[in-house]
Image (cartoon, rainbow, N blue to C red):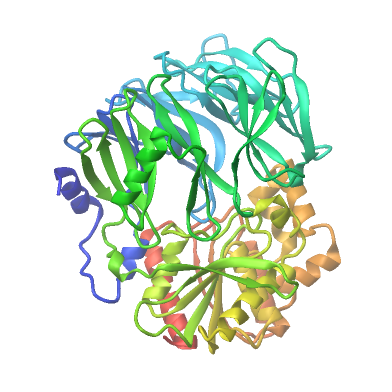
Amino acid sequence: MTRFILAFLIIFASPVSFAELIPVEAFFKNPGIGSLKLSPDGKHFAATVNIKGDKKLVILDVKTKEFKYIFSFSQGYREIGSFGWFNNERIYAEMVRKVGPLSQGRRTGYLFAGNIDGSNKGQILPRPKTPGRTSESAKNYRIVNELPNEHKHVLISMWDGKFQKTYKLNTYTGARTTYEKSPIEYGELVLDHNGTARAIQQNHPDDKMFRIFLRNDGKSKWELFKEFDAKKVGMSVADIAYDFKSLLINVRNTNVKRGIYRLNLNTKDFSFVKKIPGDSDVENYLYHYDVKNENYELIGFRQMPGYIEDTYIDDKHEGVIFRNSLKESFPGQIVDLINDTRDGRKTLIRTWSDVNPGTYYLFDNITYKMEYLFDSNDSLNSELLAPMEPISFKARDGMEIRGYLTRPLGNKKKNLPLVVYVHGGPYGPKDEWGYNYSNRDTQFLANRGYAVLQINYRGSGGRGSKFQYDAYLKMGAEMQDDLTDGTMWAINNGIADKERICIYGASYGGYAAMMGIIREPELYKCSIPYVGVYDIKEWNEADTWDSKNGREFVREAWGYDDEKFVDERSPSHNVSKIKAAIFLVHGKKDPRVPISHYYSLTKALNKINYPFESLVKPFEGHGFRNEENNYELYTKIEAFLKKHIGN
């Protein structure tokens, strides 16, 4: 074990003695190193590290694995979001607003940078105040081209009112000059590898239409190519081909065969390239680093209909051959290529699976040597974790619903106590195969002897816009029925003991955990609602309400202005039907689902003298971040489940 790994264990972890029962701390301790990226010259790593609950950015020497510098960019309500390398000596980190671990932090528009020795660090966006120039308000931005041949500059995109612009940004001073401007309102520029805009994707908030505009080169006139209902988008630009003469287009929900197509920018010829199988979304695109062009080439895409499935455009491509050889070296694992050195010699690799939180390696493409770096969670023994099984069933209206079943290790596979674990969102997020933040709960419960059922109810992401958007206003009804039907599927197949079932979830999952025991009082013996939405009228207290789009979403998806709907679908208005035991969990500083939801529900329960257990922490947000609070929470969850459905 390297000196770095030993030091890391001493500083950030406590030794865990593994038995058949994994300690709660092993599951819910804050991760030491979260993410890792390799510098362009391959001499350093940049990594996010959790130190006493705060996320920091550290620089590590690749050879010695020693810390060279720790950046504490986080301040107040802001913490590090995405990060990366501007060049060999300079790193960057964007700031996001702290919401809580159950939801992505909101982007703040702030970008910080520093040299790897800690010098010349400071704010790059918004533009720092200078003599004779007023301070600039923060705006959302995106790094769109790293300009590998320019040491001090990158291209960024930023909105100027209704129009998007690209700028050449000086990564040392924050100075920027306009590079290009979209002539189309709400139009997002799509750049080729030279930084020239060749397409515009417009999602118009007024007429709710999605449009694609094209041009042959940087001087041609923009022309409308296609338009769709924004909630039934038929195609989107995947990438611009290396010849700069064509686009690769992801096509679905249209009258042509689903797949990747090539669109010639000059002739507008549209040719089929590769079929996208099934109805699951493209999770992400797969790229190969082209050393000659110093850029990444699209070679395939990833889907998750159940297990992970990778599809390649050309199986004979050198990048595909390389990926397949890595896959053979790590059977049963998913292999992700994080990034490459500028000369293409070294590749940072992460392997992971449903029973592996993640392992990092550094591969040398010249010597073919694979160097082990570290495990994301070295307190967990993968042999004691349970495999996730993709499942599907027909809902009562005939719709196919998918999800995952995780059964505890051992010979007993039938008549198990069951926890129906509901993911949040509800629109867009989904349950996924693999060990991730949400599935820590899954593995913890399975290790305690429970079968865990995760259901991608209608409205979940991953199966196209229709599956998601058609579920607006169906919370507490059809969406809840999907959970009930999944529970009945587990009972009817002998997996679950019908007398020992609990429903548990956070955020929207907390809403569903309450609505489950309201709509099905005889089905569930207990419920664990965690930071849940309990009164639809309380949405106006959430940070979602701060934006115009957020208010429109709440009105359109949650029926905010319909008093009858609010009354029928708010758990706090319907507590008289409950028979199950309840354990409520909330944080007083939750900006996404404020504590007022908890007060609304407990007031209603107290009014009818209905007993419940609860855990409320004064400084937690949308999900518990503090390690000790999490240890307490999951110890109480374990005791609550044992009391009501046994194990």
Q: Residue at x 41, y 74 (%)?
A: 446
Q: Is residue 28 depicted above or below 107 in this figure?
A: below
Residue 519: x %, y % from top left? 71, 79
Q: Is residue 571 depicted above or below 495 in this figure?
A: above
Residue 455: x %, y % from top left? 58, 68
Q: Residue at x 69, y 79 (%)?
A: 518
Which residue occupies the extreme front position in the image? 316
Residue 129: x %, y % from top left? 52, 17
Q: Is residue 209 visible?
A: no
Residue 138: x %, y % from top left? 59, 28
Question: In front: 533, or 245?
Answer: 245
Q: Is residue 347 visible?
A: yes
Q: Quadrant of residue 45?
A: top left
Question: In front: 31, or 127?
Answer: 31
Q: Quadrant of residue 501?
A: bottom right
Which residue occupies the extreme bottom position in the image? 499
Question: In front: 355, or 421?
Answer: 355
Name the side, left or right, on which 297 lies relative to 459.
left
Name the side, left or right, on which 74 lies relative to 424.
left
The C terminus lies in which quarter of the figure?
A: bottom left
Name the side, left or right, on which 16 lies relative to 57.
left
